[in-house]
Structure formats: C-alpha cells, structure tokens
Amino acid sequence: MIGQTISHYRILETLGAGGMGVVYKAEDTRLSRAVALKFLPENLAHDAQALERFRREAHAASALNHPNICTIYDVGEHNGLPFMAMEFIDGESLRRYIDGKPLPIERVLDLSIQIADALDAAHAQGIIHRDIKPGNISVNKRGQAKVLDFGLAKLVRKQVNLLGANSQQDALAEPVSVVGVISGTPSYMSPEQVRGDDLDTRTDLFGLGLLVYEMATGRQAFAGKGAGAIIEAILTRSPTPARTLNPELPLKLEEIINKLLEKNPDQRYQSSSAVLEDLRLLRREFEPGHPRTAIIAQPPAAAPRGRYRGIAMAGCALVVIALAAGAWLYTARRAHALSETDTIVLADFTNKTGDAVFDETLQQGLAVQLEQSPFLSLVSEGRIQQTLRLIGQSPGAKLTQNIARDVCQRIGSKVYVTGSIADMGNQYVIGLSAVNCATGDSLVQEQVQAKGKENVLDALGHAASGMRAKLGESLGTVEKLDTPIEQATTPSIEALQAYSLARKALSGANFTASIPLFQRAIALDPNFAMAYASLGTVYHNLGEANLAAEYTKKANELSGRVSEREKYYIESHYEHFVTGDLEKAAQVYDLWAQTYPRDSIPPNNLGDIYQTLGQHEKALAEFQDCFRLSSDDGLTYANLVFSFINLNRPDDAEATAAQALAKHLDSPDLRLYSYELAFFRNDPKTMAEAVQAAAGKRDEESTLLYFEARTAAFRGQLTKASELLRRAVASAAHEQEKEREANFESSAAIWEALSGNATESRHHATTALALSNSRDAQSMAALSLAFAGDSSRAKALAADLGKRLPEDTIVQLNYLPAIRAQLALNRKDSASALQDLQNALSYELGVAGSSSFATNLLPVYVRGQAYLTAHEGREAATEFQKILAHRTIVVNVITGALAHLGLARAYALQGDSARARAAYQDFLALWKDADPDIPILKQAKAEYAKLQ
C-alpha cells in the first residue's frame, strides 16, 4: 500500500503488524499532519468477532479525549477492509522503553501517574481497557505515555448525575471473547480475568500494578514457561518483593504496588483516582529540595514481618528515632500548611508610602506570583465581588483586613493574605502575612526590603516565593515555577497598575471598559505579553476575531519571557484564536490542566472547543469541572446553561440560570440565553423583556436586537427583520464594533438568499465584506453569494479562506465544505456536493459561530438540498429531520423553519402525500404572518396547492 492515497491519507511506510491489525504511517493531506492508519488484516475482514473488536476499539478510544490516550481521528473502509486513522506517536513501546532494566524512580512515578490518569478518564466514561500491558503503552520522544489498543474494552453500567439533571444514563456492553478462551495477555491478566469473573475497573488497576512493578524492577511480576504456569502464579503466588529486586525503591512505592496487586479486588485500590492521588503525593517527595529520608530509610521487605527481629532490633531503634525526629521537624515546619483543597483570599495592600502608583499594583504582582503555583488556589475576583454584595458591601469595596476576613469566612477559605508597603528614605519595606480566617492567627509572615522603586517588584517576588513554601507547596515546584514578577508581567509598575485595573474590570464582565486599560499597559510597556494576550481574549469574547488574532499573535511573539502558566495561556489561545487548530488548542489545554489542576480556565475553554465541534456531552462535562473549580462565577453558569440548551434540556438550563440569579450572578450571556429559552418556550413576553433590559447596554443591545431580527426572519417577517437589523448594526457601529456589524450583515445575507431574495442578499454580503474579512463574516458572505447564484465571487472568497486559514478546523471542516457543496449544486452536480460535505460530518452539530453570528447546522441544510437535487427523498428527509431534532442548537436561524419545507419536499419525492401535506402545513403555520411576496413562500404555497 506504500504510496497509495486512501480517502485523504497518503501511506508513507509500514509501522508494524500483528494478529489484529497492520499499522502504517500516513500523511493526512487535508490537514498536513502525520497519522497512523490501522487496517484489519484481510483474513479477518469477514470475522464477526474481529470486526466487532475493531469497531469497539474505535468506539471506545474516540469517546475519550485525554493527552495520555491515543486519539482516534477517523474511521473508514478501503476495498472492504476497515481502517481507523489514529494519532501518530513518534516513540517506542513501554516494553522497549524498559528494556529489561529498572527505570529511574522519577520516571517510574511520572509514567505511572500519566497511565493512571488515562485510566481514570476511561473509567469515568465507564470504559474498562482489559488489556493493560507494556505493549499497549507507547512513550513518545517527550517522555509522555500514551495508552493504545482499546480492542478488548468493555463498557460497564454507570449512572451519570449531571448538574440540574435527574436522568440516568445506562450503558452496558458484553466483552468480545471466544467461548472457552480468555481475552487478554496471560502475563498481564488480573486474577478475576483469569477466572472469567465479571470485571469492573479494578481489573485495570491490577494491570497498572503489573506495569509499575515492571518499570520499577525491569522484570515481569508473573513469568514462567507456558501460559498455564503464568496463570497459576497469578492466582496463587505473590511476585518477588519489588524492593528486593531494586533496593533503591521507596517503601511507599512498594506499598502502592502491593495494594494494586492484591488478588482480592476488594482489598485492592477501589478507583484509579485513589491510586493517582497516592502516586502524586509520592512524586512530590522527589521534587528538588524535599527531604527524602523518611521514604527510603527502611530496609527492603524481602522477608515476612517478624523474621530476624532480634538481629535487626538495634538498627530499627535508630531508624525509629531518626524518623520520629524528622517527623517532628516536618510537622513543625508545616503545622499551618494549606491542603490541596484550601483556597486563599487575596486582600488589598496597605500602601503607607503616599505614592498612588502602588495602589492595586502590588496586589496584582502578588497574584501573578501565587498563580504560578499549581498547589495554591486564589479565590477569583468575581467570587469576591459576589460575596461582598452578600455581606452588604459594594462590589468595589477595598478588601481591608476586617472585610477580607469576613469574605474569607463567608466563602469558606482557609486563609487570607494581606500585604503592606512603607518607605524609609530610599528603602521600601514590604510585608506579607497569611492569616487564619477562623482564628485571626498569623500563619506565615514574610518581610523584605527593596532599595529604590525599581526593585520593589523583585523584592515582592522573593517574599511571595518564601510564602509559597511556608504555606505547604513543595520546594520543587516553588523553584521550578518561579518566574520573577517583572519578567512574568512587566518591570513597569505603572504598566502593572493599568493591567491590574483592567483585570478588575474583566472580573465584572465589563469587557469594553478593560480595553483602554490593557492598551495603556501596552503603551507603557510594549513587551507586556500578558496584556496583549488578555486583549486577545477580550476581543474574542466581543466577537472581534481579527483583533483577537492580532493581539494574541503579538503575545505569542513575546511568550519567551513569561511564566510557565502564562506560556500555557498564550500557546493555547494562539492555536484557538490565530491558527484555529482546535485539536492543537485542546492538547495544550489538557497539558495546562495537568500542570495546574486547580485552574478553571482549561476546562472552561475545552468546553468551548467541544461546543464548537458539536461534542456537547463532552462540553457539559468540562463546564461541570469548571463549575467545581469556580462555582460562583456568572460566566461558568452561563456556559452550563448554554450546554443544557444545546443538549435539548431546557428545564435544566432554566434551573441553572435561576441558581445564578439567586446568587446575584449575572452576565450578558446569561441574559442572551434567557432570550433563547423564551424562544423555545414560545414566550414573547420574556423575549421582549430581555431585549428591553439590554437597551443602552454596551455589548448587549446590538446582540439582542440582532436576535430579534433573526426571530423575525425565522417567521418570514423580512421587512421587520430588516428594520431590527438596521438598529442592531447602528448600535454596533456606535460602539465601533466593525466585525460585529459584518457578522450581522452576513447573517442577513444568508436569510435573504435562502428566502429567494438574491439582490438583497448580495447587498448585505457586499456590505459585510466592506466592513471585515474575518473568518466568520467572509465565510457566510461566501455561502450567501453561493445561495444567491453568484458562484464566481463565492468561489474566489472560498479560495482565499482556504489559503489564509489552512489550519483552521472550522474553516476546513465546516465552512468550506458547505460553500463548495453549494457551488456544486449551482452546477447541478449533487454527487460532488455530497462528496464535499463528507468532511463536515464529524462537526456538523457544532456551534461554529459566535453569539453575534449563526451558522449552526448549515452543512446539514445544504446536504438536505443536495439529496433533493439528486431526487433521493428518503435521504433528504433524514437531513431535514436532523435539523428539527436539534432545534435547540439551530435556535432561531431561518433554516430551522425552512427545514419543514425541505421535509415536505422530501416526502413529496417519496410519493408520501399525507406526510408531505403535514410538513407543508407546519411550515405555513410558522410563516402565517410572513411577508406575502417572499419567493420561497410563494413556491411553497404553489407546491402545497398541487397536493390538495
């Protein structure tokens, strides 16, 4: 097959072959990336069990998205042979990586943590791997483990209790096995697997124990001549103690291994999360600067306890004394340390210098330093503002020590951190104090001096680093993740002050108010990377994609001088906003979440990506993770509400919105989604109230007016839609939001074109393109021109998009397929149209546009039209029914109404007059108040009359 192109994969070389598949390295010509293609061997192409195992592997792995699980991109068939396209891993199997020798202890722990984390993700989805072994783990050149081959995976019954939901989801699948033959690899089976018992997730934990044992010792735990001897050993014998084979191993690691390898599943670890926690705690002991004697001082457990007790007594007594002394010192050092679940309230600094430049500035500098810690978790500014309201303070009140303590107690945090600065001639004295919220006791204090104003930030950084260690963070991460404040942010105190004020504006969801403050920070320090990155995020949230890309690109150019956390922020946003490669963005967010598990940004933005791609269950799961990390935030609630809407769970959406309002949390998005919910409920009163509430509000008025215009177009009231659109555009123009204007205009171009008003459509498209060439506006302008029959202009715009945005997931796999398919339909070439739309199948349920733009399910609508053109009524009906079944995703886009007409035409093609008449009636009822001269309405009435 070398050199052949299969689908859009060009095969380059053979990577390997086995009983269940042949794997090739190939190039994905569409996305210019290396992939691995796995084919089922020809001799198994008609084997029902092999086909099912192959299908199961694709199904199980594709349901998981984790940096330590090999990603499945695609499945297909070539000449009767099924294949799957997978992530290409440039590395080697764990078996070769071990190569019969123990790995360094840190590598054992790092790889064990990664594999355990992958299993935890699989188990959370109800998936048991059942074949965990070194050959099914790959280690890439970056030392990252990847779990492969879910061919023996089994789904177990599970109950999913989602926020606001009372429903249960049950999924049960039988394992794939031949009667009388045990599935799996003998040396790596659990006792219950050998016996043929029912399996649960604990069987994978036994397999994990075998992997950790082999990495730690270089030897298999159970080996022998023949499968019978191996199986007997698994059932009846214990492996040689790991520390006998490798005396350098920590006692705690041997204890973890032994617990994983318990014969009785009830005595084993009961969950992957439990073993993951123990592995992570042990790994912290090996970070630089951490005392290690307590975990390696005891002798290997080579003999049963009690044997040779008399000989070892003196030595044991010395060890006990040493450990007791070490434990006392360790306890004394960390007597007031925080746990990994505690949070911190950051109070305002007391500025005794009389110099206003320190106001806000030092608190922000301290926040940047503390946010570098994966151990500490600062309470968000938004949650603090909400709590201030609850205790009768204004949201902008200064967090003095008394108010900070009240807020801290109300939130349930462990400590609040306060600071002060005073000047003594040319010297500045900076003090930090961490105070127990419940008792008022000072837990940690730091005091430093700075000679001159230019050294204040550096001194603050040293004080913050000392505080991090005393609060309980390991010295290893303090040393590793400790970029100086002036490098992580800016050496300019004035620029940092502007940045701090901008961040405070953002905490109140006041995006536009933050813009001039971020711009001032940049003017004061043109190398301020995070100010550029923050502006990029602000413009993205305002729907200004070009400006978002411009500022994020600049941040990326300056990212060599930021902290580790900020590198994750900038790199992920660069892929998200600039290249548009959502797969790469998701990978960076995953790595960010692993390094900073208490940071709410990665799950929030992963949820956004999954929504964009149409993976709404995954989006909900990420937003719920974000909710657990940052529950008192209006944006978090808004994202949950939107997820429930997309999943057609309006009751849950309404209940979640009510929870937010009860907590006095609000955001523009929440009000927008209340409009959508009212549209679903056919509640014009609430819709009108939402529009009225947005009047005069920047960032809100234009969007709600636009939504009203869309609703009018959905009902065929194009004259009313045109007037409302004019007002929406004027409102956006008043705020100088050109891209939002362009989005509104290109949306109108779509609804006019689909209604049959080609001239009006071209006018709106031309206006949109004059305002902006942003991805969304240009894509929809191109599609509207294709709908309106202006194929030459549409084709040129599509070519430009493909050239400018070759890595953009939505352009390449949503927008361009729809545009090209419509151009093919203009040529009466339905076959080519359907072929073009194949690329959109995976993402067609995605929410591709922004709140100021509507592209949802447009590829589905075009596919329905293609089937109508091909006179394939049944297939056309399926596509239009898909739109109607996902009306909560389509919302009030005009295709939601026109799908009824498309369905009527599909039924008529099938000769099913009764269902055709019913579908025509549904459409005409929706358009009962429509403008009478709309071309598509006239056509529908004429077609309906012929059926009477």
Image (cartoon, grey):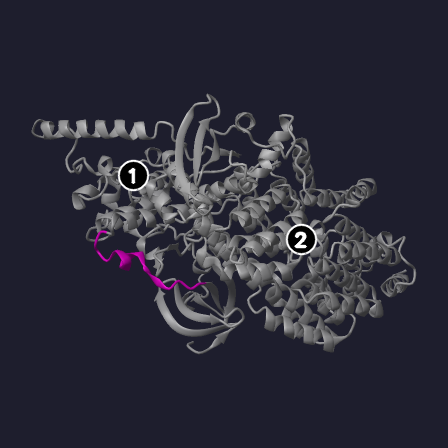
Which residue in the protein does label 1 denote? 256
Q: Is residue 93 magenta?
A: yes
Which residue in the protein does label 2 denote? 542
The residue nearer to you, when weighing 517 against 278, is 517
Q: Is residue 499 visible?
A: yes
Q: Would you say the residues marked 2 and 1 are in contact, meaning their CB atoms lie under 8 Å apart?
A: no
The residue nearer to you, when weighing 920 against 636, is 636
Residue for point 32% across, 43% down? 283
Q: Earlier in the sequence, mark 2 or mark 1?
A: 1
Q: Position of residue 247 (x, y in %)?
A: 17, 43
Q: Is residue 518 magenta?
A: no
Residue for point 38% across, 28% down? 336
- Residue range corresponding to the magenta coloring: 87-102
Q: Position of residue 564 (x, y in %)?
A: 43, 51
Where disc 2 sits, the SS reads loop
**Residue occupying the far front of the picture:** 425
Measure how far apart labels 2 and 1 are at the Cα level. Answer: 50 Å
Q: Quadrant of residue 748?
A: bottom right
Q: Quadrant of residue 259?
A: top left
Q: Is residue 374 visible?
A: no
The residue nearer to you, when weighing 415 against 837, is 415
Tell me the kind of residue under disc 1.
Answer: Ile
Image side of residue 434 versus residue 576, left or right: left
Image side of residue 632 versus residue 418, left or right: right
**Residue occupying the far left of the picture:** 311
Image side of residue 390 versus residue 211, left or right: right
